[in-house]
Amino acid sequence: MLPPRGQQAVNLGLPAHSLNDSTANPSLYNYYQWVLRHYFKNQTLNELTAKLIGMAFVCNHIFKTDLPQPLSLNPWQRDQMLDYPLATDRAVIVENNGIFALLATQHPNWSLINQGGNDFQTDYVTLMQRLEARGIRFTYLGDLDAKGIQIADTLFCQLKETSIEDFLALQTESRVSEWLTLMGHPSVKRTKRLMVKTPALQKQMTAISIFGKYVEQEQLMPIYETLISEWLNSED
């Protein structure tokens, strides 16, 4: 099975949105669509979907259940899940839908929560607050562009029990600077400073603005796998 298209693009040395956003690189996108229409006309591409936005809560290995993972919970299930038995005491929140889907497929026992971009539904926030109140520690991984940092800030400000040290345990200030230096793509639009409230995330916003570069989550997959594994298995 192919990974989500964003990951396919990065594996080919392209920005993550090249194959699924007609405005990112119109010529390349149109050529890709032409190839799909003409060379795969009567075939179905076997690829993971990143179309997860719209669900109230999508998670992997958070609740003790025999149901197939990941779980997609709708608003009508929210109240029943507030005190449902837990399978973990820590979880990684992943902003990017495709990266969540890929990580959950490749590491089915990892405890992951899909943040779903800038989609802060009431049911999602309520469940997140309840999970942290029950003792689950959250850490966060997202796109390293201005919007990505703003999304991280919006989520962190909704949480009530999570420390900034836990929240940015993997996406640290030093790692962000390193990733921007080694992997960053230049873009005035995606690095224009946006308003954030949290001091630690203000520093990451400043770094992105000064570098004038962004890094997408798809570029960090090999690094993520090591960092996530170590954090989920840590006993600190």
Image (cartoon, rainbow, N blue to C red):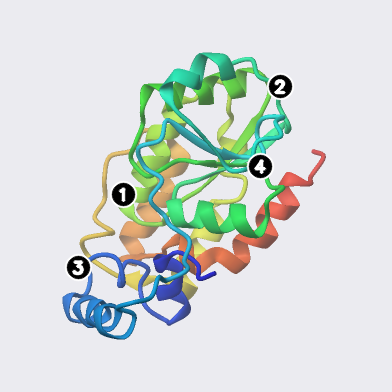
CA separation in Å, label 3 and label 1: 19 Å
Q: Nearer the viewer, mark 1 or mark 4?
A: 4
Looking at marks 3 and 1 on the same chain, the residue that comes earlier in the sequence is marked by 3
Query: What is the three-letter code of the residue carrying label 3?
Result: Ser
Looking at marks 2 and 3 on the same chain, the residue that comes earlier in the sequence is marked by 3
Q: Is residue 165 above or below residue 33?
A: above
**Which residue lies under the disc numbered 4?**
111
Residue 117, image x, y percentages:
37, 44
Q: Nearer the viewer, mark 4 or mark 2?
A: 2
**Which residue lies under the disc numbered 1?**
147
**Which residue lies under the disc numbered 3?**
22
Looking at the rendered image, the quarter that the C terminus falls into is top right
Query: What is the three-letter code of the residue carrying label 1?
Result: Lys
Residue under the point 56% across and 51% down: 172
Looking at marks 4 and 2 on the same chain, the residue that comes earlier in the sequence is marked by 2
Looking at the rendered image, the quarter that the N terminus falls into is bottom right
**Which residue lies under the disc numbered 2?**
85
Side of 199 where 59 appears, left or right: right
Looking at marks 3 and 4 on the same chain, the residue that comes earlier in the sequence is marked by 3
Q: Is residue 195 above or below residue 5?
A: above
Crowding near the residue tagged with mark 1, few <14, some 14–19, many ≥20 C-alpha atoms within 10 Å: many
